Amino acid sequence: MSECKALMVNRGEDKSISHQIETIKIDDLPADGDVLVAVEYSTVNYKDGLCLGGKGGLVRTYPHIPGIDFAGEVVESKDPRYAPGDKVVLTGWRVGEIWWGGYAQYARIKADWLVPLPDGLNCQQAMAIGTAGITAMLSVLALERHGVAVEDGPILVTGAGGGVGSVATALLAAAGFEVAAVTGRPDVAAYLQTLGAATVIDRNRLMDGDSKPLMSEQWAGCIDSVGSQMLARVLSQMKYNAAVAAVGLAGGADLPTTVIPFIIRGVALLGIDSVMCPFDRRVEAWNRLATDLPKPALDAATSVIGLSDVPAAGADILAGRVRGRLVVDLNR
Ligand SMILES: NC(=O)c1ccc[n+]([C@@H]2O[C@H](COP(=O)([O-])OP(=O)(O)OC[C@H]3O[C@@H](n4cnc5c(N)ncnc54)[C@H](OP(=O)(O)O)[C@@H]3O)[C@@H](O)[C@H]2O)c1
């Protein structure tokens, strides 16, 4: 084994982005990583769409191998925590952005960034969960820590048809919560019900009418992938002492609201970050995912593609056309 297949992204002098599947030398992988992993599966997340399209200023140096998460088997390790044959998972740490990532059959990576594959999951299932799924779990854990309980009332999930939203819907429903799933795509309603959503709300209906700082109290909690005006609307509809886990910005990075929901209803806005999340919390989240996420829901949320499908999938996810989770099989 001295070479492997990789999806390389290049940027031309005119700033145009191109993608090629290339054969690269294993020796050309980042030299300062201490664990070499044979990547079995990666995924396509929203951030991968940005990296694949050269958007958001995330990738600074070209040629580049994107892929913000992967699962596979350790081949070589200079770190005592890992040995050849160990199965591992990688999410975050800006891998796939400023460090070559999971869209290659091998990745050389820092041992500190890895998590052992939890019992009860194989590599494909771990990547069906991936960055989106661990972020959904971190959000559920944050709501739990805040004290949100099943008897408090329904929980809203925005961007429910996407990766974070799908896993969040399945996790919350499996925990017994009444989930109201917000989507802009009427055709994903049946899918969201399969994941356990009790109600599917049309995005336009949630946003209907004039925005006010306080509207009628409806939700005991929310996991929000959208941000911007939708997050502002959600905050205005939260019950007294409810909590919103702010995860994403699929609808925009702004937050056009007032402090009124926070100071009149005691609403908490909980920031969720999966990228620099400490090791112990990652392990806690992975262990909970392995036990709590129903495998049929995970299967329903997952489609498997090959490396050559990834550039088109990146464009699709930015356009909001991807349902659930896209797993990339590096050996397909
Ligand atoms: N904080 C973290 O550590 C972290 C980790 C992972 C992801 N994220 C962020 O979380 C967000 C979701 O990530 P993902 O991988 O789940 O992406 P995704 O699969 O593309 O899901 C995003 C969903 O948001 C909805 N959406 C898209 N554009 C919208 C718009 N203009 N207005 C309202 N809703 C819109 C769509 O759902 P419907 O079609 O169902 O409406 C879409 O499927 C992204 O912003 C991502 O960057 C953050």
Image (cartoon, grey):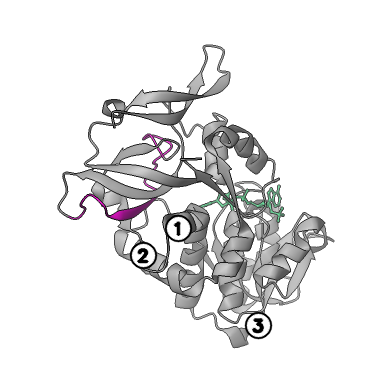
Residue 150 in the figure: left or right of residue 282: right
Inspect the image, locate mark 2, and give the three-letter code of the amino acid beneath it: Pro
The structure residue drawn at horizontal position 52% and vertical position 44%, both measured from the top left corner, is: 328
**Residue identifier under label 2:** 118
Query: Splitting the image into 4 quarters, where does residue 198 fall?
Result: bottom right
Q: Which mark is residue 126?
A: 1
In this picture, is 26 found above or below 154? Answer: above
| Of the image marks 3 and 2, the number of the one nearer the N terminus | 2
Q: How far apart are labels 3 and 1 at the CA level?
A: 30 Å
Q: Amino acid at mark 1?
A: Ala
As drawn, the label of residue 153 is: 3
Crowding at dot 2, Cα within 10 Å, few <14 / some 14-19 / many 20+, comes out as many
Between 34 and 309, the one nearer to me in the picture: 309
Which residues lie in the magenta part? 81-101
Q: Position of residue 50 (x, y in %)?
A: 56, 36
Q: Are marks 2 and 1 in contact (CB under 8 Å)?
A: yes
Q: CA distance from mark 3 to mark 2?
A: 32 Å
- Tell me if mark 3 has few (under 14), some (14-19) or many (20+) residues whose alpha carbon lies within 10 angstroms of its own: some
Closest to the camera, between mark 3 and mark 2, is 2
Is the stretch drawn in magenta largely helix, strand or loop? loop
Are the residues tagged 3 and 1 within 8 Å (C-beta)? no
- Which residue shows up at 20% across the image and 52% down it? 83
Q: Which amino acid, by three-letter code, is at mark 3?
A: Gly
